[in-house]
Amino acid sequence: MAITDVDPLVLKDVTLLIPDADFKKAVSAVVFTPTASSVSWTGLGSNTYTDMATATWTLDLTYVQDWETVGSLSAYLFANEGQTVSMTFAPRSGSGPSFTADVIITPGAIGGQVNSFAETTVSLGCKAKPVLVPAV
């Protein structure tokens, strides 16, 4: 059996285009999350069958709120609620593959704790499974 090498991913310099602005400076985490449930059927002969439903996907963004900078991610999400936009996420800016998805914009939380950065997380629904775009 062959032993597969690994090149661990450390997020440092990413690209996060939503739709044409790169919001990487406002974001501290980008996670595409699949959710799928199992479905089972049991027959009267003590026979059972299990399968998995097709996964649905969300794009979870953790970001710092910025309500003063024109074009900030906070303002963009707030102003474009309900819009479906194409976005691109490259885990390594300038190298490696990227992922594209059509996401449904929803605003994030407003405000936070005293004496700390107002960081929040928002889950944007994906219209379909993200598309893996190989590196060029």
Image (tube, helix red, strand yellow):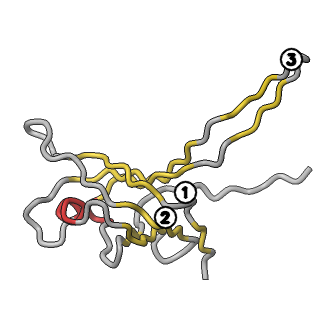
Q: Where 6 sits versus 116, above or below?
A: below
The amino acid type found where label 3 is placed reads Leu
Q: Mark 3 highlights which residue?
A: 44
Q: CA distance from mark 3 to mark 2?
A: 50 Å
In this rendering, position of residue 16 left or right of residue 127: left
Mark 2 and mark 1: Cα distance apart in space: 8 Å
Q: Is 117 placed left or right of 1 in the picture? A: left
At label 1, counting other C-alpha atoms closer than 10 Å, the crowd grade (few under 14, some 14-19, many 20 or more) is: few
Q: Position of residue 86 (x, y in %)?
A: 42, 72
Q: Residue at x 88, y 22 (%)?
A: 47
In front here: 96 or 37? 37
Q: Which mark is residue 29?
A: none
Q: Residue at x 41, y 70 (%)?
A: 15
Which residue has dot 2 on it?
A: 91
The residue positioned 26% from the left and 60% from the top of the image is 81
The residue wearing badge 1 is 9
- Identify the image quadrant of residue 129: bottom right
Identity, as a three-letter code, of the amino acid under mark 2? Pro
Q: Earlier in the sequence, mark 3 or mark 1?
A: 1
